Image (tube, rainbow, N blue to C red):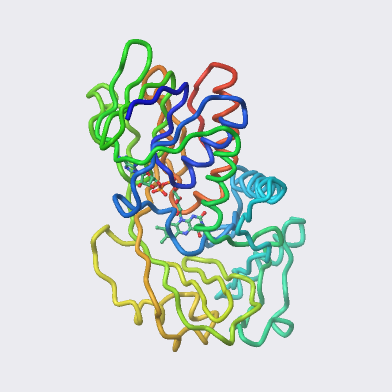
Amino acid sequence: MTASASVLVVGGGVVGRACARAAAQAGHHVTIVAAPPGATPGASGLPAALLNPYRGRRGAAHPADLYGLERTWAWANELAGEGFTPGVERTGVWRVPDREAQANAWRAQAETDPGLSFIDPEDVDARLHAPFGVMVVRQGGWLRPDVHLAALRASFEASGGHWLEGLVQRVSPDGTRWRVQGDGIDATADVVLLATGAASPPGLPPAVQAVWPDLVRHEGDVRTVQATDLVGLAPVAGGSYAAFADGTAFVGGGHREPGTAADHEKAVRDLHVAWAVPALRDAAVVSVWTGVRAKTTAGRPVVQPLAPGLTAAVGFAGRGFLVAAAAAEAWAAQLSAGRLDRLEL
Ligand SMILES: Cc1cc2nc3c(=O)[nH]c(=O)nc-3n(C[C@H](O)[C@H](O)[C@H](O)COP(=O)(O)OP(=O)(O)OC[C@H]3O[C@@H](n4cnc5c(N)ncnc54)[C@H](O)[C@@H]3O)c2cc1C
């Protein structure tokens, strides 16, 4: 198949779809080239993703993550307005301190930050073990990636975008344009965005390969566990996290070398979140999703020009769903201005 487009986005994860949607809505002629289902599953296939900018032991929020969250909610409203189900749950997010000093610091933070509040230990839901209280991220929440990704694709296509399926094997210059070739794909475009997550696209020219951003990869899991008695709890975030749905919980965690095996029942018991939500310790693991997230050496996602007209959007690590919409808007604005510069998010 031969197709011609002014913009070609390689990769149909949340970042590729968000960038493609923003560019299509800005009036560009956009095609996504997505790997066929099962070919190279990306990190966006996880069963539940938290939307929480207040991260790490300090529970501090990076301004770009706060802005990312704001744009994610704005997009959820837009998708709903267009008639698509965004798959988001605006529940707030709970952070459970495990030491008094941490609780005191978080309580003080909640007193000055209107995005936060603090629940004293005696007022916390009895299903939580929170001897030092709970910090509430009021604007946080979680989403169901399969539903959200379907909404992004539907909105992209409704904005005139095209969807091609195929594994890209070669990206090469074609005069002032770029040519993308692979299984069933042979397309050229003025601008190509590579949004291939933790995978480096094969077949890049050596000069482009030489400037591909350095990425550090970690493998982790999201386990679906039985949790009938945890319905209605807000998600709990930390080094590991849990989000609660009808009769099940999605328990995420893990930070290991890709390819290393894990004992899943034991892993759930060992997670910090099982300390905070004791019912999870005995919950049966129903299924396990394993994926690889990639971060840049500086830790922040980048949208980085590799050559005139060729850009990589990578390093979204554990915050792809949090910042994809903001990244996409910034990239599409540059596209419309005809100037693609490096964006650090
Ligand atoms: C265990 C775990 C828990 C996480 N929890 C959260 C969370 O709670 N909240 C949050 O915001 N984020 C979370 N993340 C991170 C989030 O999943 C990622 O940041 C996000 O999915 C990255 O999206 P992406 O589009 O960059 O990459 P991907 O989703 O990996 O998409 C890249 C796409 O490119 C395609 N591709 C690759 N090579 C080719 C090729 N040659 N040709 C065609 N297509 C190709 C792949 O098939 C894939 O679909 C978590 C990640 C993991 C692993």
**Relative to 166, does residue 28 appear above or below in the rendering?**
above
Q: Is residue 29 left or right of residue 140?
A: left
Going by the image, does 305 lie left or right of 232?
left
Name the residue nearer the viewer: 331 or 277: 331
In the figure, 262 relative to 296: above or below? below
Res 147 quadrant in image: bottom right
Q: Quadrant of the N terminus?
A: top left
Residue 187 in the image, given as x and y percentages of width and height? 35, 25
Q: Position of residue 126 (x, y in %)?
A: 66, 87
Taking the image as shown, residue 228 lies to the left or right of residue 77, namely left
Residue at the front extreme of this rendering:
1
Instruction: Please indicate, yes or no, whether residue 297 appears anywhere in the rendered image.
Output: no
Residue 292 located left or right of residue 142: left
Pick the residue in front: 211 or 179: 179
The answer to whether residue 291 is seen in the rendering is: yes
* Image label count: 0
Task: Locate residue 313, reporting x and y percent.
Answer: 44, 36
Relative to residue 228, is residue 212 depicted above or below? above
Q: Quadrant of residue 98?
A: bottom right
Q: Position of residue 26 (x, y in %)?
A: 62, 27
Residue sitting nearer the eye, 264 or 256: 264
Q: Which residue does the image show at 44% across and 74% down from the upper left?
A: 224
20 versus 84 height, above or below: above
